[in-house]
């Protein structure tokens, strides 16, 4: 699957993933009203509005980006209807040729972790039938429980040609409370990066492994250091835009071939119409504002990369 992601990045010249993390406050009033008329002010109505919103964003950006990344918590808060919207979003993204990174941050031990992996990346047998429950192409994984929690995901990736991104150094301000703690003379996140290398050796697909890492754009020096330590792992980089990361901050996350990283933006794209620089689009054309935000992000990143690598 990592090879397919690389092919799509090259084809679209766009190392960008759009985070589909909608809140009801992001959804234009007219769209929300349509769903409430159809389903009432209910969990079903909210979930329908979220799916309609996502579909419009996907339509606007599918030719510009290789992937989208729905964050499951934004859907789970609406219960079973929300999970239905999550699944419908994944299926619709696939129908538009997009790769889907499920931002699920799962991680447990033994059969529990295996079940999470099957739910998001694998297949489940029901009698004589076989199903893909959610069907993402990649999933984010929390490594806090160690190899017991990650190996079931690696095994399922092997079986189904899928991939994972392991949390290494996250973009949030308090990440250092645990991730920066010194263990045997180096930060904990370096130990996790070492394990990413180890887990990834059995999952190579060309020059890169199916086991990637999550490293926040808000820590470019950490990105520079870890890029050298995990040269064969793709890096999923959150923190661009709304959390302060810029194109120049992202250069250290890439290898000299211009590959090796895919950058996420969520609010900065899906809620772009609320930002002053895109207000001209208005609520009715919210997806056009998202498209322009992707175009601007692509230019920012590629300009920075061209300047640094050429």
Image: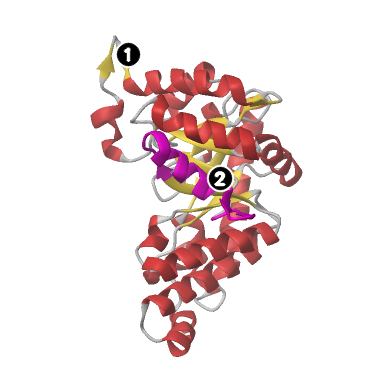
Quadrant containing the N terminus in the rendered view: top right
State which tag comes first along the sequence, 1 or 2.
2
Is residue 85 placed above or below 222 in the rendered structure? below
Magenta segment: 105-133
Nearest to the eye among marks 1 and 2: give it.
Answer: 2
Q: Position of residue 208 (x, y in %)?
A: 64, 26
In magenta stretch: residue 34: no
List the residue tagged with mark 1. 186
| Cα gap from disc 1 to disc 2, whole angstroms | 33 Å
- Residue at position x 32%, y 21% from top? 188
Q: Is residue 285 above or below residue 9?
A: below
Task: Describe the element under mark 1 as helix, strand or loop.
Answer: strand
Residue in view at x 49 percent, y 38 percent: 237
Which image quadrant: the C terminus? Answer: top right
Front-most of residues 231 and 87 = 87
* Residue 121 numbered mark, or none: 2
């Amino acid at each position: 699957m990592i090879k397919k992601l690389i092919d799509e990045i090259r084809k679209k010249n766009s190392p960008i993933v759009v985070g589909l993390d909608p809140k009801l406050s992001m959804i234009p009033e007219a769209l929300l009203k349509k769903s409430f008329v159809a389903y009432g002010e209910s969990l079903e109505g909210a979930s329908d509005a979220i799916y309609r919103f996502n579909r419009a964003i996907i339509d606007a950006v599918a030719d510009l980006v290789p992937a989208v990344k729905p964050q499951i918590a934004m859907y789970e808060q609406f219960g079973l209807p929300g999970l239905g919207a999550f699944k419908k979003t994944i299926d619709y993204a696939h129908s538009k040729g997009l790769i889907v990174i499920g931002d699920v941050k799962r991680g447990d031990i033994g059969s529990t972790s295996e079940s999470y992996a099957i739910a998001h990346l694998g297949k489940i047998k029901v009698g004589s039938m076989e199903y893909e429950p959610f069907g993402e192409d990649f999933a984010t994984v929390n490594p806090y429980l160690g190899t017991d929690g990650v190996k079931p995901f690696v095994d399922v990736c092997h079986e189904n040609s899928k991939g994972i991104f392991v949390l290494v150094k996250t973009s949030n301000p308090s990440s250092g409370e645990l991730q920066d703690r010194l263990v045997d003379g180096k930060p904990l996140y370096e130990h996790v990066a070492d394990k990413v290398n180890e887990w990834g050796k059995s999952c190579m697909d060309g020059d890169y492994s199916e086991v990637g890492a999550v490293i926040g754009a808000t820590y470019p020096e950490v990105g520079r250091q870890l890029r050298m330590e995990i040269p064969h792992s793709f890096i999923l980089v959150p923190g661009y835009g709304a959390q302060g990361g810029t194109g120049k901050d992202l250069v250290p996350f890439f290898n000299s071939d211009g590959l090796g990283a895919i950058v996420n933006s969520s609010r900065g794209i899906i809620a772009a119409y609320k930002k002053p620089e895109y207000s001209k689009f208005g609520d009715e054309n919210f997806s056009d504002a998202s498209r322009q935000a992707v175009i601007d992000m692509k230019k920012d990143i590629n300009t920075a990369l061209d300047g640094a690598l050429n």
